[in-house]
Image (tube, rainbow, N blue to C red):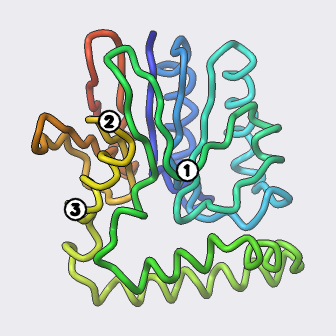
Amino acid sequence: MRTLFISDLHLHSGRPDLTRALLQFLDQQAENCDNLYILGDLFEAWIGDDLIPEDLQPVITRLRQLSDQGTNLFFQHGNRDFLVGQQFAELTGCTLLPDNYIINLPTGQALIMHGDQLCTDDIEYQAFRKQLRNPRWQQDFLSKPLPERLQIAQQLRAASKEKNAGKSMQIMDVNPEAVQLALDHAFTDLLIHGHTHRPAVHQLAEGNRRIVLGDWDKTGWYLECTENGQQLIEFDIQ
């Protein structure tokens, strides 16, 4: 069994090279995989399933083709695309997963998540995250006309950039205690996540491990899991 993980591609119209890189990845690396997990922030922004930018439509089409060919697709929400919904799932053939999810790999169980929920030192962000994940807030937002949603999304993104500019890298990284608590709660020794844009394989206490997926920019990242173990792979984006 061959399982792949990606996250933090941040696809948008201003970076057609990232879209091309993903399509190439789906055609080549993911072509014969059994499972593909997308651990959030596939898109730079997502304001509802009723607005799919034309330049991202090939991504939707190719994911559907991959699903139809027999690859199991799974999607976890990130902090940029938390409004991806059931219509997207139906269009792509993917299964939407909850924020924390335990999966079976050939080498054992693993806990997967986007990872922003582990950044507990950033109290301000966690409060903001709680607001955006509130079903009432989301329902109210999705009921607004598209132009208004676009404006709100731009304002939220600008405010987020301004706030993050004044925060230390440490406060925006995962909290070690939150990591250990998540592993203990899941009764697993392997955690796989994205969000922090700090790709690495961390050896933790008591034989636990934390694998962090990388974001896609000048290079792309994916995690490959087989019976032989896990390999974090980087590749160039042209």
Q: Nearer the viewer, mark 3 or mark 1?
A: 3
At label 2, the amino acid type is Thr
At label 3, the amino acid type is Glu
- Of the two numbered discs 1 and 2 on the same chain, state the one appearing first in sequence: 1
Left or right of residue 63, residue 164 in this image: left
Categorize mark 3 by other alpha carbons within 10 Å: few (<14), some (14-19), many (20+): few
Image spot of residue 57 (x, y percent):
75, 44
Image spot of residue 76 (x, y percent):
57, 47
- Of the two numbered discs 3 and 1 on the same chain, state the one appearing first in sequence: 1
Is disc 1 placed on a helix, strand or loop? loop
Quarter of the picture containing the N terminus is: top left
Judging by the rendered image, the residue that carries numbered circle 2 is 188
Is disc 3 placed on a helix, strand or loop? helix
Question: In the image, what residue occupies the spot 67% across and 74% down?
Answer: 134
Judging by the rendered image, the residue that carries numbered circle 1 is 42
Left or right of residue 214, residue 42 in this image: right
User: How many numbered marks are there?
Assistant: 3
3D distance between C-alphas at marks 3 and 2: 15 Å
